[in-house]
């Protein structure tokens, strides 16, 4: 029989795993994206600005929500009616395509035009690229928590019987 202390201990361990999960997400932002030779961010500032709220465990899933504007913006995309930050897009185009001056500005124009036609490419969420590694980390944390709590429960029951 599983007692409440076991469940509470697992939940506490999962919530305490926030730094590990955050590190995994930040690592994912600095790794090469699928199908490209570029990471999600070039300077490292984006990955450092990502933060998470304390996870909520609903009994079946551990739900993480971003506690930072860059995290939400990257994952959810640009909301309808919002404009693209042209200065940031210029930096991105410069680094991605190695363009400067009027060539860069023309490319920025075409990127914005394409985004307006096709929709924001981030709408599916950058998190999809790193989700499998984050899920693996959460699974490891869950296994560790279950084993730790099972050992505590076993010691408690063994000590009662002795």
Image (cartoon, rainbow, N blue to C red):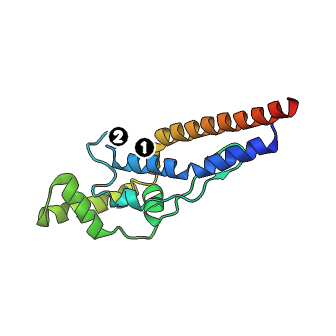
Q: Quadrant of residue 59?
A: top right
Pointer 1 local density, CA inside 10 Å: few below 14, some 14–19, many at least 20:
some
Q: CA distance from mark 2 to mark 1?
A: 7 Å
Helix, strand or loop for disc 2: loop
Note whether residue 110 is visible. no
Q: Is residue 73 left or right of residue 3?
A: left
Observer-nearest of 118 and 46: 46
Q: Where 55 sits versus 130, above or below? A: below
Question: Residue 118 in the image: x percent, y percent?
Answer: 38, 54
Q: Quadrant of residue 31?
A: top left
Task: Please give the label number shown on residue 34.
Answer: 2
Mark 2 near mark 1, Cβ–Cβ under 8 Å?
yes
Q: Quadrant of residue 144?
A: top right
Task: Please give the label number shown on residue 106.
Answer: none
Note whether residue 139 is visible. yes
Q: Is residue 34 left or right of residue 61?
A: left
Toward the right, the furthest residue is 161
Q: Is residue 102 left or right of residue 136?
A: left
Toward the front, the furthest residue is 162
Query: Quarter of the image containing the N terminus?
Result: top right
Question: Residue 21 in the image: x percent, y percent?
Answer: 51, 48
Question: Residue 46 in the image: x percent, y percent?
Answer: 36, 59
Q: Which residue is mark 1?
A: 129
């Amino acid at each position: 029989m599983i007692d409440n202390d076991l469940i509470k201990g697992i939940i506490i361990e999962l919530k305490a795993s926030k730094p590990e999960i955050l590190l995994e997400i930040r690592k994912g932002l600095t790794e090469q994206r699928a199908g490209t030779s570029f990471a999600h961010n070039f300077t490292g500032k984006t990955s450092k600005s990502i933060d998470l709220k304390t996870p909520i465990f609903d009994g079946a899933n551990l739900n993480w929500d971003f506690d930072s504007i860059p995290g939400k913006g990257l994952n959810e995309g640009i909301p309808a009616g919002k404009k693209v930050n042209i200065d940031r897009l210029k930096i991105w185009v410069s680094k991605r395509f190695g363009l400067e001056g009027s060539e860069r500005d023309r490319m920025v124009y075409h990127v914005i035009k394409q985004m307006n036609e096709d929709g924001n490419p981030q709408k599916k969420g950058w998190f999809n690229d790193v989700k499998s590694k984050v899920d693996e980390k959460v699974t490891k944390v869950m296994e560790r928590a279950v084993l730790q709590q099972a050992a505590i429960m076993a010691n408690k029951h063994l000590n009662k019987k002795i």
